[in-house]
Amino acid sequence: MILKKIIVGETSELSGVVTDALDRAGFPHTASKTPVLDSLGTIALSDWNIHPVIKYTEHQASQNRRPFLHINIDGLPIYEIPSKINRFIEFHKAQYLHIIAAASAERTTFGERVGDIIDNVILMGRVQAGTGKIEGSRTLDELVFEVLAGLSLRDKSEIANLGEDALRLLQLHVDKLMETRSADVQRVASRREIMRQVWLSLRETHRLRVVE
């Protein structure tokens, strides 16, 4: 599923943070007075205290039979949020997505975290915007595959079952890419983003699960 456009509601207190992140990535977006109606699904980002704007948007989505997903960014590791958004887009085929973000006033770092989430949704390569993003996403996939191919089964299992501090274990492997594919690395992602994508991939394929 290719995400064609993100719609930002003018009522969002953090609409500027969202649009700034979209501008950095060159991602198509537009502001709307009726974003719920103009989109095929709404994702609301908040802290633990659901803001009145979020509650109102959820009501509007319910009234107009539009898919709605609320994500408490305090309640999830930040690396899980892009995948959660991606699954929502895929399931509802939401090519036009409305994103809203609001939090309590004392959360001074909330806007920065929202910007990081928007960046990661776009840069992770799973959510693609138009044909211009596909080539870069394929190159990122190739770089991730090269790193995975150079890991032993033991390394893969160890990294998959660690937290995000596992990225340091991938540093040497990603640095090797700079020797042969420096231009590709600099064009599609940072070295840290490649490490994150390798780690996320391993969490999906090599993480130990308890069978009840």
Image: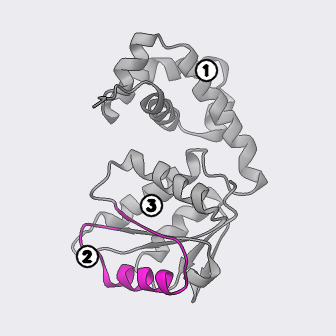
Magenta-span inclusion, residue 24: no
Q: Which mark sits nearer the N-terminus, 2 or 3?
A: 2
Front disc: 1 or 3: 1
Are the residues flagged by discs 1 and 3 in contact, CB closer than 8 Å?
no
Residue bearing mark 1: 146
**Residue type pointed to by label 1:** Glu
Q: Which mark is residue 211?
A: none
Task: Kindly report the distance in space between the C-alpha atoms of the residues bearing marks 1 and 3.
Answer: 29 Å
Question: Residue 51, percent across and down?
Answer: 31, 79
Question: Residue 112, percent across and down?
Answer: 37, 61
| Relative side of 120 to 112, left or right | right
Callout 3 crowding tier (Cα within 10 Å): few <14, some 14–19, many ≥20: some
Residue 12 visible in the picture: no
What are the residue bounds of the magenta stretch?
A: 46-72
Front disc: 2 or 3: 2
Q: Which mark sits nearer the N-terminus, 1 or 3?
A: 3
Callout 1 crowding tier (Cα within 10 Å): few <14, some 14–19, many ≥20: some
Residue bearing mark 3: 115
Residue bearing mark 2: 104
Report the residue at 38% width, 19% height from top. Answer: 157
